[in-house]
Amino acid sequence: MKKFTIFYADDDDDDLMFFEEAVTSICENDQSSIELCLLKNGLNLVDSIEKNNQKDSVVFLDLNMPLKSGFELLEEIRSKPKINSIPIIMYSTSSDQTNISLSQKLGANYYAVKPNSFKELMKIISNAIRLNWENHAVDTNNFIFNKIAV
């Protein structure tokens, strides 16, 4: 069983808890090994990624956070040669096309709209850990991660 690391930065406690519960449930149901690094803001995210630079990892970034926005963090990660290839999924309640387009322009791999159901969240996370990111080419015509089937 391979170990997978998820970095998730979000300032909303409820969203962090919901995400953590989904990861726990996936680990129990699928016997997956997921290390989850939850961050209340993006200030320590880049350092955390650099310290734990795992081959099998993905970043979920909330767009609207104080101190550093998801867009600022996306730009910062993409500017760092050591970690610029880590897969990044922008993760927001917003389905605004401007946010989606900017995420794509700044180098996100995908954009996911936060789901209302636990089952849908589990599907998003499961797809993120099952995707072979090394050999995966992002389809710019299908940038919304919620629609990806793995």
Image (cartoon, grey):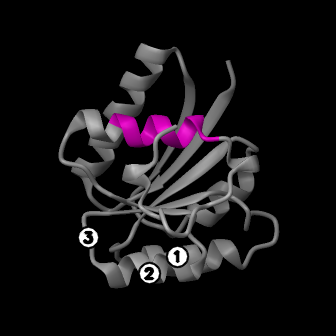
Frontmost of labels 1 and 3 is 1
If you read the primary sequence from the N terminus, does the residue marked by circle 1 or circle 3 appear first?
3
Q: Residue at x 42, y 24 (%)?
A: 26
Q: Which residue is mark 1?
A: 104
**What type is the residue that disc 1 sits on?**
Gln
Q: CA distance from mark 1 to mark 3?
A: 14 Å
Q: Farthest right residue? A: 81
Position of 111 relative to 2 (above/below): below
Residue 53 seen in the current view: no
Q: Which residue is mark 3?
A: 94
Asked whether disc 1 touches disc 2, contact meaning CB atoms under 8 Å apart, the reply is: yes
Q: Which residue is mark 2?
A: 101
**Residue 88 x/y as whole percent:** 56, 60
**Residue 150 x/y as whole percent:** 52, 37
Which label was assigned to residue 53?
Answer: none
Q: Between residue 2 and residue 14, name the one nearer to us.
A: 2
**Residue 140 x/y as whole percent:** 55, 69
Secondary element at tag 3: loop
User: Dot 2, how many residues are within 10 Å of its Cα: few (below 14), some (14-19), or many (20+)?
Assistant: few
User: Dot 3, how many residues are within 10 Å of its Cα: few (below 14), some (14-19), or many (20+)?
Assistant: some
- Residue stretch rendered in magenta on the structure: 122-131
Q: CA distance from mark 1 to mark 2?
A: 5 Å
| 25 lies left or right of 89 | left
